[in-house]
Image (cartoon, grey):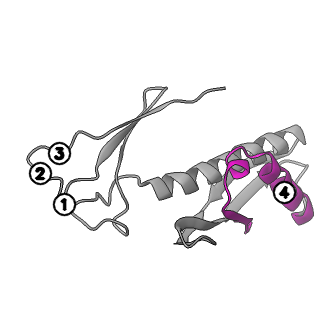
Amino acid sequence: MKYNVKCVWKNRSDQIFSDGKYSRVHRWIFDGGIELTASSSPQVVPLPMSDEHAVDPEEAFIAAVSSCHMLFFLSIAAANHLVVETYEDNAEGILNKNEEGKMAITKIELKPTLKFSGDNVPSAGQIANIHRQAHEKCYIANSVRSMINIIPS
């Protein structure tokens, strides 16, 4: 399988560029046609060179981990005849120096809150087991070195 995303920056206009004071705003264009405005994080590159309203790569990375985990959780729950009404994750990532002294997202915490319905409501242990299985199957989690903790509420 192959996935494609176009990343386009066309913001030099009249900026000097070589002084480092250029806009980091760019576009992500996904193969399904969705376009998002992206930028460096204002925590990394100060305003006005960043856009606080745009998605930054660090947020996108954390969202990808959260989304992948959720999708596997939902598929495992469905296969076990559980009815998930809602799944909401307030995921958090920590940017810090890694073992090599390089800046990296060193830790991600997934904090999902779930609501089930029907006659087959799982126990806390069953939910934890589904989270474990989802984490083991998640393509994104299997692709990164960051510690990923799942802390259901």
Q: Percent from the top left, x then y, of residue 150?
A: 74, 64
Magenta-tinted stretch: 124-153
Mark 2 nearby-residue class (10 Å; few <14, some 14–19, many ≥20): few
Which one is nearer the viewer's eye here, 126 or 19? 19
State whether residue 80 is above or below residue 149. above
Please, what secondary structure does the residue beneath circle 1 have? Answer: loop
Q: Quadrant of the N terminus?
A: top right
Image coordinates for residue 66, horizontal then vertical, percent: 63, 53
Label 4 to label 3, Cα distance in Å? 46 Å
Q: Nearer the viewer, residue 82 or 51?
A: 51
Between the C-alphas of marks 2 and 3, the distance is 5 Å
The three-letter code of the residue at mark 2 reads Gln
- Which mark is on residue 15? 2
Q: Are marks 2 and 3 in contact (CB under 8 Å)?
A: yes
Does the magenta portion include 132?
Answer: yes
Magenta stretch contains residue 45: no
Residue at 37% of width from left, 62% of height from top?
A: 41
| Residue named by callout 4 | 132
Label 3, residues with CA under 10 Å away: few <14, some 14-19, many ≥20: few
Residue 78: quadrant of the picture = top right
In the rendered image, which residue does mark 3 sit on? 12
Count of residue discs: 4
Q: Nearer the viewer, mark 4 or mark 3?
A: 3
Question: Type of residue at label 3?
Answer: Arg
Q: Nearer the viewer, residue 114 or 112?
A: 112
Q: Earlier in the sequence, mark 1 or mark 4?
A: 1
* SS at mark 2 in the image: loop
> Closer to us: mark 1 or mark 4?
1
Residue that numbered label 1 is attached to: 21
Asked if the residue at tag 1 contacts the one at tag 2, i.e. Cβ–Cβ closer than 8 Å, the answer is: yes
Query: What amino acid is labelled 1 in the image?
Result: Lys
Q: CA distance from mark 1 to mark 3?
A: 10 Å
